[in-house]
Image (cartoon, rainbow, N blue to C red):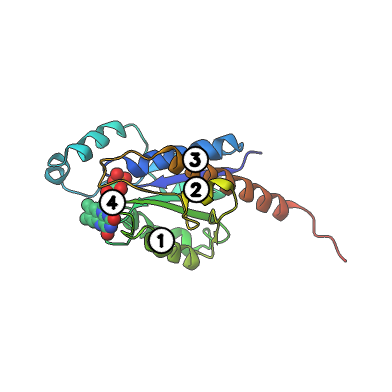
Amino acid sequence: MAIKVAIIYYSATGTTYRLARAAEQGASEAGADVRFRKVRELAPEEAIASNQGWAAHRLESQHVPEASLDDLAWADAVIFGTPTRYGLPTAQLKQFLDTTGPLWVKGALVNKICSAFTSSGTAHGGQETTIVNLNTTFYHWGAIIVAPGYADPIQFKAGNPYGASFTSNNGALKPDETALASARFQGKRVAELAAQFVAGRLAPMVSP
Ligand SMILES: Cc1cc2nc3c(=O)[nH]c(=O)nc-3n(C[C@H](O)[C@H](O)[C@H](O)COP(=O)(O)O)c2cc1C
């Protein structure tokens, strides 16, 4: 049976969306069954309309289904993407995470494989802190955090062992091939490790 991977992200101007598509590709190529989901937009329409890039991406992503708790319950592994907001994940993604109480209370998030990626406007604008802050939630879930580390040569080029990331100059630049390859690798790595974990869980215990 294929391993189940959910990609759940927020993106205003499309940078994180493109990284999410690359992570989706990596997980799919590793044989996973992938659900690609955006979280609900919370910003007022006036704010979106006042930013050309934001309005254009809203249109571009209008057919992406919104994430639900069922996607989390279904998934063996979840890869989350968010732009940085003052070094933290976006309110939109956080709001989705804040709806997960009903799963958490049942222990349904325990042993999920979780991983995160991000984008920022500037090079030292908080990519690592955004991922680390997002990961804090996964500790509370009892999830297993899988970072890309330097587990593939692309990571030495991409340079962020916490998760795929891209410096977008506030949405003006689209992720380059290095960032996309890093996100593909992250998707592949998460799917492969999740498959090994699930296979191990299903295997009969062997007494010494
Ligand atoms: C309210 C707000 C806060 C932001 N804070 C930061 C920040 O702390 N550091 C940074 O480098 N970029 C910051 N940015 C820029 C975005 O993180 C960046 O443009 C990102 O690549 C956008 O991703 P997206 O295209 O997926 O929406 C901020 C943007 C907004 C709107």
Q: Residues within 10 Å of mark 2 (few under 14, many from 20)?
A: few
* Residue 29: x %, y % from top left: 58, 34
Q: Secondary structure at mark 1?
A: helix
Farthest right residue?
Answer: 208
Residue at label 2?
Answer: 157
Relative vertical location of residue 177 with respect to residue 104 in this rendering, above or below: above
The reply to whether callout 3 and callout 2 are in contact (CB within 8 Å) is yes
In primary-sequence order, the first of circles 1 and 2 is 1
Q: Nearer the viewer, mark 1 or mark 2?
A: 2
Q: CA distance from mark 1 to mark 2?
A: 16 Å
Q: How many marks?
A: 4
* Residue 147: x %, y % from top left: 53, 56
Residue at label 1?
Answer: 128
In primary-sequence order, the first of circles 4 and 2 is 4
The reply to whether callout 1 and callout 2 are in contact (CB within 8 Å) is no
In primary-sequence order, the first of circles 3 and 4 is 4
Q: Residue at x 80, y 59 (%)?
A: 205
**Mark on residue 121?**
4
Q: Residues within 10 Å of mark 1 (few under 14, many from 20)?
A: many
Q: CA distance from mark 4 to mark 2?
A: 19 Å
Q: Residues within 10 Å of mark 4 (few under 14, many from 20)?
A: many
Relative vertical location of residue 18 with respect to residue 75 in this rendering, above or below: above
Q: Secondary structure at mark 3?
A: helix
**Mark on residue 161?**
none
Residue at label 3?
Answer: 181
Q: Nearer the viewer, residue 130 or 155?
A: 155
